[in-house]
């Protein structure tokens, strides 16, 4: 099954993350948040948003003087698409390898372990 939207680039994903966290916003506001983490030009942010509009990743509300951009794709849907591609490309479809690598790559907080344990219990219960 082919995804509805193309895979976002790293720069596009950064902008989508801002829109998911802060909601719809203008180029200027998005640029200000983006430039806190790295140096980038306003016109670069604008150009990326224009390309994202063409690709269907964001929509643009042109009813005001300053255009407002909205994420056109859901965060969870995008994460699922990216994980699915990573799972196939880097781990040959082996979920266990992906999870083991993710868990061994950094320190896991006790709350995360608890949430994972709960998820595993639910998965095991539903597979019976």
Image (tube, rainbow, N blue to C red):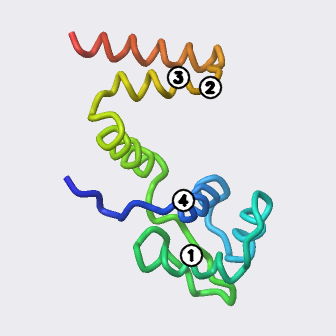
Q: Indicate which disc residue 48 carries.
A: 1
Please name whichever residue, 83 or 90, is drawn nearer the observer in this view of the structure. Answer: 90
Q: Secondary structure at mark 1?
A: helix
Give the foreground label among 1 and 2: 2
Crowding at mark 3 (Cα within 10 Å: few <14, some 14-19, many 20+)? few
Residue that appears at 43% across and 25% down: 99
Determine whether label 1 and label 4 are within 8 Å by CB. no
118 relative to 7, above or below: above
Q: Secondary structure at mark 3?
A: helix
Q: How far, Cα to Cα, is label 4 from label 2?
A: 21 Å
Return the x and y of residue 33 as percentages of the image width and height: 75, 63
Q: Which residue is mark 3?
A: 103
Quadrant in the rendering for residue 92: top left
Q: Which residue is mark 4?
A: 10
Q: Secondary structure at mark 4?
A: helix
Residue that appears at 47% across and 77% down: 53
Q: Which residue is mark 2?
A: 106
């Amino acid at each position: 099954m082919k995804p509805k939207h193309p895979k976002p680039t790293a720069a596009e994903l950064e902008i989508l993350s801002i829109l998911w966290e802060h909601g719809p916003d203008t180029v200027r506001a998005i640029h200000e948040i983006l430039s806190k983490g790295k140096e980038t030009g306003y016109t670069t942010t604008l150009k990326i948003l224009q390309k994202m509009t063409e690709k269907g990743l964001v929509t643009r509300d042109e009813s005001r003087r300053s255009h407002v951009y909205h994420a056109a794709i859901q965060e969870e849907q995008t994460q699922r698409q990216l994980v699915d591609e990573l799972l196939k490309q880097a781990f040959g479809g082996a979920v266990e390898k992906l999870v083991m690598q993710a868990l061994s790559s950094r320190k896991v907080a006790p709350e995360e372990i608890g949430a994972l344990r709960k998820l595993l219990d639910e998965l095991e219960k539903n597979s019976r």
